[in-house]
Amino acid sequence: MRLAIDRSGTRPLYQQVRDALRALIAEGKLEPGRELPASRALAGTLRVNRGTVTAAYDELVAQGLLERHVGRGTFVAQGLDLERLRERERPATAAADRLSWEGLFARDPLRDRDPILAELGKLSARPGVISFAGGYPDASFFPVDEFRRAVNGALRDEGGALLQYTASGCHAAFLEALKHLLLERGLAPAEDEILVTNGSQQGIDLVARLFLAPGESVVVEDPSYHGALASFRAAGARLVPVPVDDEGLEVAALARTLERERPRLIYVMPTCQNPTGVNLSIARRRRLLELAREHAVPIFEDDFKGDLQYDGDPLLPLRAEPDGQDVIYAGTFSKILFPGMRLAWLVAPPPVVARLAALKQSADLASSPLFQAAITRFARGRALERHLLTVRREYRRRRDTLLSALEREMPDGATWSRPKGGFSLLVRLPAPLDAAELLPHAAAKGVVYTPGRVFSLGGAAPALRLSFGSVKSVQIPEGVRRLAAVVREALKSARRARPSQALATTA
Ligand SMILES: Cc1ncc(COP(=O)(O)O)c(C=O)c1O
């Protein structure tokens, strides 16, 4: 199959492949039921990466124009309404005199975005679907009434000042409450070591902008949090992956990496790593700090779940270690309380905070003082402490339910991480299954997850993340039963399609 591709333009290749295929389908040149070339073959013909073709196919599958049948291939969807499709294509051509936006962007933040992320929201919203896709806390645990009283009380006592611009971006009483909270995590920062941010995502973005120039490298765990990968990519950085195992980041591999790379940052989640949920062992924490010091590379610690640890004595952040003073630390209320509040913080040495504060000011001037004041009252009345006791108990129960269900239901060859806290774990499916390809089948059976490839730089095709924070305990076993049935069915088809390979993988 030949498609016209413009390599000189700034338009992403996968979009060009996607649109060319869309046009062929709309024109009836690729008729419903027609098999498309395998992604590898088409990539060879077009002289593009296989990922480019896969991304184009994924979007067309998501749009309902293509269908994937595990073990058989990718086909133009049956029963397409070609008239409607042509109708939808028409305005694009009629608008030839409109601005061509694609050529006007300095950089395209959508270029590296996996289209499957947008698809997950839609699949999760389907009626009857059990979604393990969102790393969300359960909104039914949110102490809404207590928080409403805290907001009202703060407004009553402090009035318009809470609705005004603030010079420092930090509410004085909140700073004290935050310091108190951080003390329980072994941290005692001075005021000039703290920056309040709108979510830790903003903290990650600011750190990326401060430390990473285009082409410079950042070490990331593989797999890692896709939101951080997106910020680092947006800064133009080169991502250098270091694997994660049951004890967290493989520090021996990091040591080898640091021999050949001079990264500007090492981004890690030492506690309840996303997506695996594992903790970095004590010995590895020490070694990581040692390596960072030896090579003079700052560690960027994302402690997004620090207060949601379920087993043994809680681990303290790296920054609380005796030689952790140079660690840049990010924390957030998003997982322990409400993500909608967008309230989080960075702790770092004063020269770093001063520059991050200037960057933040140019991004959004300041964080809302109203929420800072409300949280201060909320924490003062011990509501935060009570809430933490409840959610730790409930999420721990969900984790245990999920682990038992996986043990009971999943076929041989599937493995998974055992999270020490937080609300995610990573499942590895047996070869030759691809978790992204399996997703539409799982959604059709009423279960959704996040394919591992969005967290990974190496593709991680067989991996998938299950987040149990917002799935009720009673639904977890049923969700896993559905997932296991889809996996078993896919394994059967794969073995039927390639008996010799199946024998090789089961041997
Ligand atoms: C590892 C990690 N860091 C940071 C964030 C961003 O959280 P927020 O911006 O809500 O604080 C998330 C969100 O899921 C996350 O998983």
Image (spheres, rainbow, N blue to C red):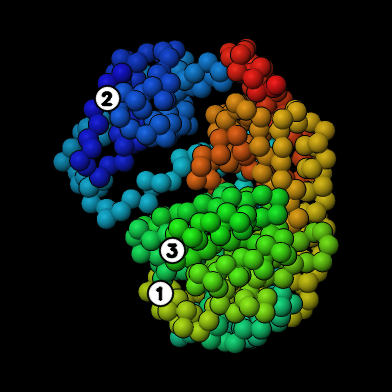
What amino acid type is highlighted by mark number 2?
Leu
- Residue 290 x %, y %: 60, 70
Task: Kindly report which numbered mark, 2 or 3, lies closer to the viewer in this rendering.
Answer: 3
Q: Are marks 2 and 1 in contact (CB under 8 Å)?
A: no
Tell me which residue sits at (40%, 74%) in the image. 359
Q: Are marks 2 and 3 in contact (CB under 8 Å)?
A: no
Q: Residues within 10 Å of mark 3 (few under 14, many from 20)?
A: some
Tell me which residue sits at (31%, 18%) in the image. 1
What secondary structure is marked by label 3? loop
What amino acid type is highlighted by mark number 3?
Arg
First in sequence, mark 2 or 1: give its number. 2
Q: Quadrant of residue 285?
A: bottom right
Numbered badge on residue 359: 1
Tell me which residue sits at (61%, 13%) in the image. 500
- Residue 504 x %, y %: 64, 20
First in sequence, mark 3 or 1: give its number. 3
Q: Can see residue 368?
A: no
- Identify residue for label 2: 3
Q: Are marks 3 and 1 in contact (CB under 8 Å)?
A: no
